[in-house]
Amino acid sequence: MNLHNLAIVFGPTLFQSDGKDYTAGLVVEELIEHYTDVFEVDEQQLKRQLDEITAIIKVREKLNLNSSVPASGSAGDFICTVYLEEKKETAEQHIKIPGSMTAAELTCEILDRRKIQVREKDYWSCWEVSQKEETGEWRERGE
């Protein structure tokens, strides 16, 4: 996940904002960008941690490639209704979502369907809403 997307996901949560203002995202983006200076992190320790994460990702990728179960398929797919900005029939989109689709991919898919151009600093987010129409969880990019 890139720096900008991390900031979008965690900014409103950390600063308990309503998600309409992107200031919280910008603050988190700055904190992440200047992580080593702000939190006085040792560069060598950070490099070791990043190397460990890279090794774990490579092992996971190898396991997925060697698996006999296909990575994608219709077994984990589901169909849901997605609303863009507000719950109205004119904003409604029905979409088949594979189990491997991320929130960022879902957002891009809906914006593409509505022919909305995404600018570099646009902040779009996904929210899960229960059948009782209660706002649920913020969907992170990897979910």
Image (cartoon, rainbow, N blue to C red):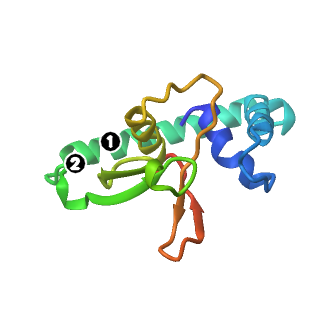
Q: Position of residue 135 (x, y in %)?
A: 60, 66
Residue 123: name its quadrant.
top right
Drawn side of residue 32 relative to residue 130, left or right? right
Q: Nearer the viewer, residue 51 or 138?
A: 138
* Residue on which the image places disc 2: 72
Please give the count of numbered marks on the rendered protein.
2
- Toward the left, the furthest residue is 68
2 left or right, relative to 109: right
Horizontal side of residue 120 vs 32, given as left or right = left
The local crowd at label 2, few if under 14, some if 14 to 19, many if 20 or more residues have their Cα within 10 Å, is few
- Write the residue at 68% across / 39% down: 7
Q: Secondary structure at mark 2?
A: loop
In this rendering, position of residue 11 left or right of residue 92: right
The tag earlier along the polypeptide, 2 or 1, is 1
Q: Position of residue 109 (x, y in %)?
A: 39, 38
Q: Which mark's residue is nearer the viewer, 2 or 1?
A: 2
At mark 1, the secondary structure is: helix
Q: Residue at x 79, y 29 (%)?
A: 34
Residue 73: x %, y % from top left: 18, 51
Q: Looking at numbered disc 1 in the image, what kind of residue is underneath it?
A: Glu
Residue 119: quarter of image: top right
The residue carrying mark 1 is 61
Q: In the image, what residue occupies the spot 55% across and 71% down?
A: 133
Callout 2–callout 1 Cβ contact below 8 Å: no
Residue 103 at what x, y percent from top left?
A: 47, 47
Label 2 and label 1: CA atoms lie apart by 14 Å
User: Looking at the image, which is closer to me, 32 or 58?
Assistant: 32
Looking at the rendered structure, the kind of residue marked 2 is: Ser
Q: Quadrant of residue 115?
A: top left
Crowd band around label 1 with a 10 angstrom C-alpha radius: few (<14), some (14–19), many (20+): few
> Residue 117 bears which disc, if any?
none
